[in-house]
Amino acid sequence: MFSYLVRRLLIGLVTLTLITFIIFGLIRNMPGTPLSNAMAMIDPGKELSEADRERMEKAYGLDKPWPQAYVLWVSNVCRLDLGRSISRKQPVTRLISERIGPTLILSVSSLLLTYLLAIPMGLYSSARQGHLDERTIGTILYMLYSFPSFVAALFLQIYLANKLGWLPLYGMKSDNYSSMSTIQQVWDIFLHAIMPIICYTYGSLAYYSRFIRANMHEVLRQDYIRTARAKGLGPVNVLVRHAFRNTFIPLVTLIGLTLPSLLGGSVIIERIFSWPGMGQLYFESILERDYPTIMGLTLMFAILTLAGQLMADIFYAMADPRVKISDH
């Protein structure tokens, strides 16, 4: 087990180095620079003098060739320093810490809601396989899975916010948020989060429900299920205690793989609803050519992805005694 973890960590370190090296080279060779973008937003008709440009490039470390700048960035990361945002004039770690909370509100709520709904729906579809209601549910789930989230977001904004006025159109807080009581503040955030959570959830709900149904369909064909039925066990007992326990094993691996999305957020959803999360920060940083913030977020997402894959393997081995993690 120990040698397996060491081997995976070494492979992950090499992968992480390649990812950050490639992304660093790509963003440093994108059209535009942080300085040109900043000047275009402040005064499009004004140009920096050569002396001012050189001074500012030196101040932000933009005067070095990008391979040399990458080595410098890696050395700073090894000292747990992700740098300072060029556009926001704040440490990248502070920006990330400020945006993690709003993203977790959406992603964790969506994940819990997905599992609470997908598991019963998957079990029900397995129990009612071939019936009209099961086919209807399957068709609806397939349509939901195929429906783009950004289109759903626009529909929700048009009908629930604009026409009906039931929910806030965008943002995370109302303008008078600071004057509200604690209960009112929680309720205000809840109302703002409903539409983004719906957009986060419905696609995952459709996927997980169909995933459970497909795995249950295979498990129900196994010999031990027929044996359980022959012993006189009821259909609910067979489904929940015997079939679903084995279906839950591949489902557990998906929990580890969802780790990056939990903290990464959704660029499209957060952008549409102006939700101040990680996805929104990533999008804004790319537009502003904010190299330190882009690299800080890229590093975090890459680490989460690699950690999620490792957790998925470990969870699978823990859930299924037949699977052993080899040290060789």
Image (tube, rainbow, N blue to C red):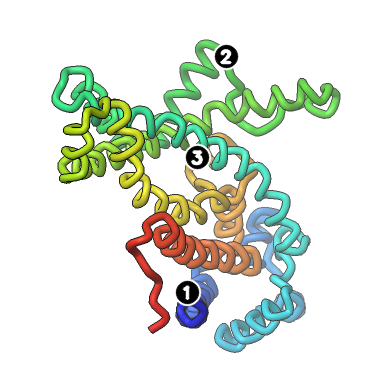
Q: Is residue 180 above or below residue 122?
A: above
> Callout 2, which amino acid?
Trp
**Gap in Å between the C-alphas at discs 3 and 2?**
24 Å
Residue 260, position as x, y percentages in the image? 51, 56
Helix, strand or loop for disc 3 = helix
Instruction: Looking at the image, tell me whether mark 3 or mark 2 is earlier in sequence order.
Output: 3
Residue 247, position as x, y percentages in the image? 31, 45
Q: Of 317 and 8, which appears nearest the observer?
A: 317
Discs 3, 2 touching: Cβ within 8 Å? no
Residue 84, position as x, y percentages in the image? 74, 67
> Callout 3, which amino acid?
Leu
Binning the other alpha carbons within 10 Å of mark 2 as few (below 14), some (14 to 19) or many (20 upward) gives few
Residue 243, position as x, y percentages in the image? 28, 40
Kindly report which numbered mark, 1 or 3, lies closer to the viewer in this rendering. 3
Residue 111, label in figure? 3
Q: Quadrant of residue 241?
A: top left
Helix, strand or loop for disc 2 = loop
**Gap in Å between the C-alphas at discs 1 and 3?**
27 Å
Binning the other alpha carbons within 10 Å of mark 1 as few (below 14), some (14 to 19) or many (20 upward) gives some
Taking the spot 77% from the left edge, 61% from the top edge, the residue there is: 89
